[in-house]
Image (cartoon, grey):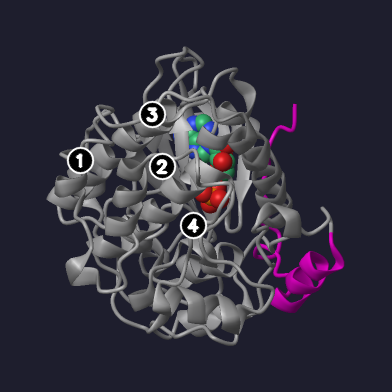
Amino acid sequence: MPSIRRQDYWIRQSNKQYSFESQYEIGKELGRGPASTVCKCSGHGLNQAWAVKILYKNRDKKVTTADVGLLLKLDDKNLIRLKEIFESKSRIYLVQELVTGGELFDRIVNVGAYTEVAAARAVNDIVSGLKYLHSWGIVHRNLKPENLLYENLSENSTLKIADFGLGMILSSEVDMSSVCGSPEYIAPEILKGERFGKPGDMWSLGVIVYILLCGYVPFSSDSPAELFKKILKGQYEFSSPHWDIIGENAKDLICKLLVVDPKARMTADAASKNCWVNLFAAKTDDLDNVVSRIKDFNAWRKEKCQMLPLASTPASRAGSRGITPFYDIHIAPSPQPPQEIEPQGSEMLQAAAEKLGDVTPLEGDEPQVDQA
Ligand code: ADP
């Protein structure tokens, strides 16, 4: 094993005998998040392909070694399976099931007909994955469209949740940097600085269901302070005409998920029994206008993600000292309602990215990825 000292390990269950490179051949890049790169990989001389998520350790030392034994044992059709973990001095390698069907919102904008039934099918898969996770006492903490991936390109492909339990591995640092990029999905209690529990995931689900049915976010403002105020009050609308076509059962589900009091919020178990989630009460009208708004939302979301720094941010460093209310964080405004969509590549996005700062991976340890 290469020269990594015991105190440099962050994860109790990481493979201490071999390095990632000695076991796997790395392939093309599949995607990037604010604090990670995902690449295809396969065991040396083997055909089976896997995905590896490479996380960059920041300079802050990890005080306690993470115990992620449970994450490695999870096995559910709606979760992307974690196979094994490797570490180097500056990186963590999470080898996981490779999925090939693309992100949820990419599929919606690329398929022909889109209806409440199609949305409910996706929500059913997410709820089923969350129910399983929550039954093991694991909270996702970062549920957002980027983490919802289809197993394959077939029409009936299963939707899977990625990145569960990342908070167990990385303390609150990465979560905080993601929050800077996607505060739209964060529950009011988290904004208040309370512990992230299962209801936090259900709030994020409520935001995703809302977007799925109208193509824009329930809470938005050009001013972060204003945005957080709206989230804290649970202040959103089913505005006309966009919501006129959407059925009462779908709205009822959202109303039960976007509840400010986490104790009164719908649980994953209750959601799994909901009539809309189970497709009985989902309408079959064509939602063409919603698809075109999701297209705009998707483009905005991807552009915003590209502008975020690769590693930790000033806000994330503050977060590493504990859970911090983040009223001071400056964020990119989200497009809502549709007539107020910011032009793509707006100066505000640029300013927000600059404000967050540009932090590079540890010296001499840049990712070696095949760009082919
Ligand atoms: P984020 O941190 O924003 O969730 P990730 O770093 O997890 O982003 O992933 C970036 C992108 O890599 C995803 O949006 C997806 O397109 C791709 N990806 C992630 N995990 C996998 C996987 N297991 N199989 C295939 N592609 C993946």
Residue 274's tag is: 1
Name the element at disc 1. Answer: loop
Q: CA distance from mark 3 to mark 4?
A: 59 Å
Report the magenta residues as a range: 346-372
Q: CA distance from mark 3 to mark 2?
A: 28 Å
Q: Is residue 25 visible?
A: no
Q: Please state which of residues 67 and 240 is positioned toward the viewer in this rendering.
A: 240
Q: Earlier in the sequence, mark 1 or mark 3?
A: 1
Task: Check disc 4 and report the residue beneath it.
Answer: 3
Q: Nearer the viewer, mark 4 or mark 2?
A: 2
Q: What is the x, y in percent for residue 234?
A: 40, 72
Q: Are marks 1 and 3 in contact (CB under 8 Å)?
A: no
Q: Earlier in the sequence, mark 4 or mark 2?
A: 4
State yes or no: residue 171 in magenta.
no
Task: Check disc 3 and report the residue beneath it.
Answer: 283
User: In the rendered image of this protein, does residue 190 appear above or below residue 244?
Assistant: below
Position of 323 with respect to 75 (left or right) is: right
